[in-house]
Amino acid sequence: DAKTTQPTSMDCAEGRAANLPCNHSTISGNEYVYWYRQIHSQGPQYIIHGLKNNETNEMASLIITEDRKSSTLILPHATLRDTAVYYCIVTTGNQFYFGTGTSLTVIP
Amino acid sequence: EPEVTQTPSHQVTQMGQEVILRCVPISNHLYFYWYRQILGQKVEFLVSFYNNEISEKSEIFDDQFSVERPDGSNFTLKIRSTKLEDSAMYFCASSLSQGRASPLHFGNGTRLTVT
């Protein structure tokens, strides 16, 4: 599975959009991009995934560049409850390997 | 929304004792997993299970570990003789199918403390 690179930490003001980047320059054509988050040692929570096209659900939007070498998770209106570690995972199957992720802090 | 449930939420055991961690996956899911997270470290894959057998395991999953689906609803992780370094959060996960478009859904974990 392709390796991903994420910033270690980010801050976002409450109510603003949080944009979390992920680089996956070695992604192959059959790999999906998944995003999970982990709030204070709870179980990882699935957010969204995509292959090529941008995706949106009730939690977030996923923007994948045309060359698929990077993506951005967007939380449109961040709340304090969105403070968590966010993981970008690229996978060909069901083996999800978690890196260190981005620690997002939403500031009041 | 259906969810993965894990019991107990916290287990304290003495070194050398056997422990069984229990999970109830989402009811129509077919693939089951255990992950662990040592405090302050990454979430690590342990094992995947399908059709009543292990489909993949990591090097962490040695002979001290075993998994079982004893009935149609439970999925268990057994550690035969616990060591201090087994202290961690253990997360169960399940997925509907195996494939790139099938997300894993995780429970909230069991915190295992070995003393």
Image: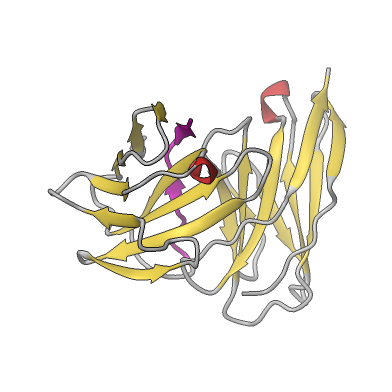
* Percent coordinates x, y for residue B28 in the rendering: 24, 51
* Residue B102 included in the magenta stretch of the image: yes
> Furthest-left residue in view?
B71
Could you tell me which residue is drawn at 43 percent across and 61 percent down? Answer: B61
Quarter of the image with the N terminus of chain A is: bottom right
Total number of numbered discs in the rendering: 0
Quarter of the image with the C terminus of chain A is: top right
* Residue A15 included in the magenta stretch of the image: no
Q: In the rendered view, does A11 fall on the left or right side of A80? A: right
Could you tell me which residue is drawn at 26 percent across and 48 percent down? Answer: B75
Query: Based on the displayed image, in which of its 4 quarters is residue B98 positioned?
Result: bottom left
* Percent coordinates x, y for residue B77 in the rendering: 32, 48
Q: In the rendered view, does B15 fall on the left or right side of B45? A: left
Q: Considering depth in this image, is A85 or A69 the residue closer to the camera?
A: A85
Magenta segment boundaries in residue numbering: B101-115
The relative height of residue A91 versus residue A99 in the rendered view (above or below) is below
Q: Which colour scheme appears in the figure?
A: secondary structure
Query: Based on the displayed image, in which of its 4 quarters is residue B40 positioned?
Result: top right
The relative height of residue B83 versus residue A13 in the rendered view (above or below) is below
Q: In the rendered view, does A18 fall on the left or right side of A3? A: right
Could you tell me which residue is drawn at 58 percent across and 58 percent down? Answer: A49
Q: Considering depth in this image, is B110 or A69 the residue closer to the camera?
A: B110
* Percent coordinates x, y for residue A81 in the rendering: 67, 24
Q: In the rendered view, does A1 fall on the left or right side of B61? A: right
The relative height of residue A21 versus residue B106 in the rendered view (above or below) is below
> Furthest-bottom residue in view?
A29
> Furthest-top residue in view?
A108
Could you tell me which residue is drawn at 46 percent across and 42 percent down? Answer: B90
